Image (cartoon, grey):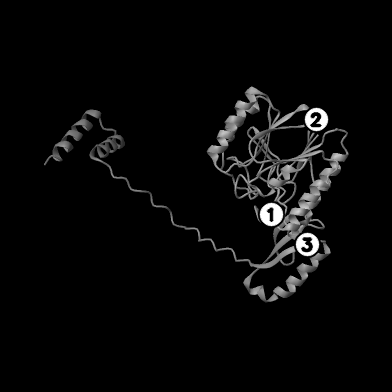
Amino acid sequence: MLLVATDLHFTDQPDDNYRFGLLPWLNRLAGESKDKERVCLILGDLTDKKNRHDALLVNRITSEIEACDHITHFIILKGNHDYIEETVPFFKFLDNRNQITFVIDPQRVPLPNGKTAYCIPHIRKNDEFDAAVAKAIASYKEDKYDYLLLHQTFTGAQASNGSEMKGVYFDQLAPLHKKGVRILSGDIHVPQDLGPLTYVGSPYAVHFGDTFKPRCMVITNKGLETDVRYPAPKKRSVALKPDAGIPSHLKKGDHVKIQVMLPREEFHQWELIRASMLEKIKARGLLCFGLEIKEQKPKEAQPPLSTEKETPAQTTLNDGDVVNNFVAANKIDSDVAEMAKKIMERSNDY
């Protein structure tokens, strides 16, 4: 079986401690499988900060991976958050351990049940990524593989804030997709299908305001795919009126930042409103990471509708138009009309 996750963004911040429950959770899923080989694919961004990690964080990540006794192997791609210098990502040392392959350069990697993946870790320059894809296509022609694993931003991907990303073009992956190669990528946190590829998405909310539905994936040796969801807290930013209740979609343990909307003339009541809101937050079992006042400005008055009738635009008519209009209105013969036009033309010569 394959367990697929990406963009874990581990940090040494106590507020992000919930993220460390992911690996034990994946290990339990692996333990429930009857497959002999149970491989965990991490498609980049093991950590949030790129370098100079605290010793406690490094040792904790290493220990958590080693404690996964039901996972027979880890394949970890270098993501854009995993390095400053491309050739020396911080966690490169993990590649020396028996159960871990840390992919720094494009390469083939064997998977369970005789399958193979071609891995292209994050590449900064678009032209270099394009060249790597061309090599991957050439490699497929020589010896077929089943998966293409990436960590890259593709143009058209939807970010967690709803904006459309710009990056490399996914059209170049079409030849592999047509051959039946399953293309999975990390980097974009929102799970989505984009052309020939699938963004697995982050297993939990990473930033406040993330509203996407997180996931990991389980792929059986027969290729059957299932979305699985790690029970992590939401990270929501909400704006409320002072007398409003806490939204029902927020559950115990969720992380919240709240803005209370108040007209300026009611700012003097802030201490009482703040205390009341904190009580509501506590009663719901939420973890508050910000509670602030925000001015609710009155709606701008709309300009009054004009009652004056619109004056039709004036059109300048030439001599021919004047004659034609007069002829049509008075039903004058065409011969007379032609004579009138000639007389007016002659008069304009003087």
Q: Quadrant of residue 172?
A: top right
Look at 57% across and 44% down and name the residue there.
124
User: Quick check: 127 above or below 211?
Assistant: above
Q: Position of residue 347 (x, y in %)?
A: 14, 40
Quadrant position of the N terminus in the picture: top right
Q: Quadrant of residue 269?
A: bottom right
> Which kind of residue does numbered mark 1 sit on?
His
Look at mark 2 in the image and give the residue it sits on: 221
Look at 32% across and 45% down and name the residue there.
315
Q: Nearer the viewer, mark 2 or mark 1?
A: 2
Look at 71% across and 46% down and name the residue there.
93
Quadrant position of the C terminus in the picture: top left
> Which kind of residue does numbered mark 3 sit on?
Leu
User: Quick check: 221 above or below 159?
Assistant: above
Look at mark 3 in the image and give the residue it sits on: 287
Q: Position of residue 321 (x, y in %)?
A: 27, 38
Q: Residue furthest top?
A: 142
Rendered image: mark on residue 207 = 1
- The answer to which of marks 2 and 1 sits earlier in the sequence is 1
Q: Position of residue 316 (x, y in %)?
A: 28, 45
Kind of element beneath mark 2: loop
Kind of element beneath mark 1: loop
**Mark 1 surroundings: few (<14), some (14-19) or many (≥20) residues within 10 A:** few
Q: Position of residue 242 (x, y in %)?
A: 72, 67
